[in-house]
Image: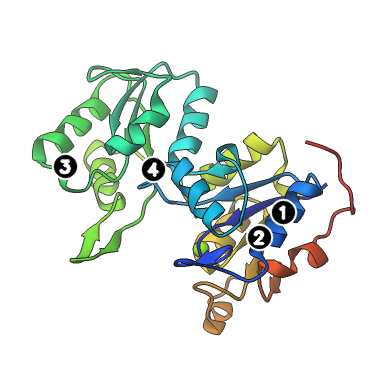
Amino acid sequence: VTALLLDLDGVLYEGERALPGAADTVAWLAQQNIPHLFLTNTTSRPRSVLVEKLAGFDIHTTVDRILTPPVAATRWLTNRGVDSVALFVPEATQSEFKAWRLTSETPDAVVVGDLGEVWDFSTLNRAFRLLMSEPHPPLVALGMTRYWQAPDGLRLDTGPFVRALEYAAGVEAVVMGKPAGPFFHAALDILGATANETIMIGDDIRGDIDGAQGAGLRAVLVRTGKYRPADLELGVNPNDVIPSVAEVPTWYPGPANPRPE
Ligand SMILES: [Mg+2]
């Protein structure tokens, strides 16, 4: 059985418009019991909002099929037996960490997300001091995006703050979010699949294709979303290129009726 990981934006929809065939493909995945997850780097909206957005496109899935950086982080924390965490994440993201004891002293892990305008010197310095405590707690980053386009202009995202903390504390963050390996590993862990029986489908040659291949998966590029022909000249070679997600049922390499999940 081949498991599938699918990107959302640019694969199932573009902006506020579903891509043709996306709803049928997702229905086909469910009907055929093909193990699959949707991978997105979005941290600003809870998964339930993404499920509602998809439902608006007549694409039907469930919250537990959507993997976001906070969810991957909780998986990592669980596997590490982490008990207490210090959170530097926006309020909307905090609810994903309900199962952990929140502490501002000697945490087992420090989790950093897109705090936006909440960042100031004392907040950043507080995270730094926690990372310097003995034994050093791991730094878990909910993505390494450098900046994003806000309505009023470009804004710093999570990456620059994580880099500052890594630099100051002399540590390397465990990054959750494409293209980082731990994010794909969390997806495999949830599906109970190995890298070589799993294929990532995405429109981003770097985040989806290069990232997945770096984690040992195969990766298929769709010619929708942010895809541009020049993407194929960047030295990254997708295992396959298909016109769009609509082709997945005819392209899918597994048996017609794989084992139920
Ligand atoms: Mg995309």
Residue 241's x, y, as percent?
Answer: 69, 73
- Look at mark 1 in the image and give the residue it sits on: 27
Q: Viewer-proximal residue, 134 or 141?
A: 141
Could you say which quadrant of the image residue 162 lies in? top left
Is residue 223 shown left or right of residue 40?
A: right
Q: Quadrant of residue 23?
A: bottom right
- Of the residues under marks 3 and 4, which one precedes in the sequence? 3
Depth check, front residue: 241 or 33:
33
Neighbours of disc 3 within 10 Å: few (<14), some (14-19), many (20+): few
Q: Position of residue 63 (x, y in %)?
A: 55, 39
Q: Is residue 232 above or below residue 202?
A: below
| Cβ atoms under marks 3 and 4 closer than 8 Å | no
- What amino acid is at disc 1? Ala
Q: Which residue is mark 3?
A: 118
Tell me if 8 is positioned left or right of 36 in this view: left
Q: Are marks 1 and 2 in contact (CB under 8 Å)?
A: yes
Residue 139 place in picture, x, y as percent? 35, 34
The numbered disc on residue 23 is 2
Point out residue 28 in the picture as x, y percentages from the top left corner.
Answer: 76, 55
- For marks 1 and 4 on the same chain, the one whose residue lies earlier in the sequence: 1
Numbered disc 3: secondary structure: helix
Which callout, 2 or 4, points to the residue nearer the camera?
2
Q: Amino acid at mark 3?
A: Val
Q: CA distance from mark 3 to mark 2?
A: 38 Å
Quarter of the C terminus within the rendering: top right
Q: Secondary structure at mark 2?
A: helix
Q: Sequence order check: which comes first, mark 1 or mark 3?
A: 1
Q: Nearer the viewer, mark 3 or mark 4?
A: 3
